[in-house]
Amino acid sequence: MHRTLAQKILQRATDETVGEAGQIVRCRVSLVLANDITAPLAIKSFRAMGADAVFDTDRVALVCDHFTPNKDIDSAEQVKVVREFATEQGLTHFYEGGNVGVEHALLPELGIVGPGDVVIGADSHTCTYGGLGAFATGMGSTDIAGAMALGETWFKVPPTIRVEVEGELGEHVQGKDIMLRLLREIGVAGALYRALEFGGSTVDDLSVEGRMTIANMAIEAGGKVGLFPVDEKTLAYTRAAGRPADEAMTADPGAEYERVVHIDVNGMEPQVACPHLPENVKPVSETSGVAVHQAVIGSCTNGRIEDMREAAAILKGRKVSSRVRCIVLPATPGIWKQALDEGLIATFMDAGCVVGPPTCGPCLGGHMGILAGGERAIATTNRNFKGRMGSLQSEVFLANPAVAAASAIAGEIIDPSKL
């Protein structure tokens, strides 16, 4: 049988023979993940099941990244529940305070996830790790509790949509723009319980960070996973993260796909998702002139060092508009320190940005950048649903870091090349 990437990875995790799409397979998991919002629910279910101990103290990760530093008493109580459980269970991977970062940037950086892994997380953007060639997907807290106890779960083998991306990316056009373009093409339900498998010359040239940005938003198309081949770029990244044993992996020639989507990026402008759906995408030239009150640069989508560099290159020597709050949140302590060492933090502060700690912050309307009624934000985050970043009367536009930074300077959405 000629297998897709999804089928190949699932086969590694089960003693059953993985066959056609729709088959139910029982799989061992490489890592189970939850955060400060979802872990308390999983812990409650874990105890209700009568479980006493997690299946492996090295393979359950709890990352307190959403409402931390604790924004209020309720969030402090949530983290307390998670902290006490991590201590009781002796978990190796518990992150809070000075070692915490946005989970989907932190775990790849630390080498905790990587190629061929099967990862489930109580967070929908767990699919990020597909950028490294992992079958990674979000699940509900009850399913997570079961996997914490048993070390396994079941999947329905997903059909795969192959996305072939060809062409040369233009100036200020990045992985984020490829994903937004795909969402414009197939919509927010276009890959419902499908695996999105990416390939083509553009993907070959794309950085690992750019691949993780795309995989991160597979869920915005309804995807079960977003998968990239494991090539030498991937292996260089994972070796640097402390995983020397990872191996290259691609889909088999002749693998069967439900459909193939072709995207030509030659001449493509930066893309912007307009309110209130990630599929409502237009070229930046069609959104130019829309006034913004806030710009957010960070999140599990675009908070990595590559993103910080892109934003800083636009902001260097310039000032954020007096009408705009520009919030920069490097996604992990490691990225924060690297940005400091490279002088990026000074660039942000000289430009008038607010530089905050590694946290999800305003992405989910948590804290550190809530929008008032009538306000409009441009953000490097992944969702722009109504009320996502605050008031139901606010609006969020999604874009890449260069567009967000340029718009912060101009006070309105603008193509960075027009500054």
Image: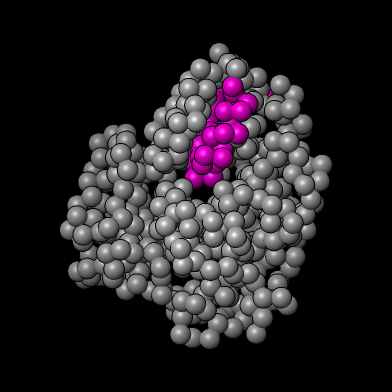
Q: Is residue 374 visible?
A: no
Residue at the image position 74 percent from the left and 27 percent from the top: 417
One can see residue 287 in this view: yes
Residue 344, position as x, y percentages in the image: 51, 28
State left or right for residue 267 relative to residue 256: right
Residue 282: quarter of image: top right
Quadrant of res 378: top right
The outermost residue toward the top is: 322
The spot of residue 29 in percent (x, y) is 41, 70
Q: Residue furthest left?
A: 88
- Camera-side residue: 383 or 166? 166
**Which quadrant, please, contains the C terminus?**
top right
Q: Residue furthest right?
A: 267
Q: Which residue occupies 70% across, 40% down?
A: 173
Say if 155 sits above or below 31 in the image.
below
Horizontal side of 318 relative to 359 (left or right) equals right
Q: Residue 140 in the image: x percent, y percent?
A: 41, 61
- Please report the residue visible at 44 percent of the width from the left and 30 percent of the height from the top: 340
Position of the N terminus, as image quadrant, is: bottom right
Look at the image and give the residue range highlighted in magenta: 289-316
Residue 161 position, x and y percent, is 68, 66
- Judge by depth and name the residue closer to the eye, 25 or 41: 25
Seen from the viewer's position, the closer of residues 249 and 175 is: 249
The residue drawn where x is 69% and y is 61% is: 199
Looking at this view, is 400 or 23 the one in front? 400
- Colour mapping: one colour
Say if the magenta span includes residue 74: no
Q: How many marks?
A: 0
Please give left or right for residue 221 compared with residue 122 in the image.
right
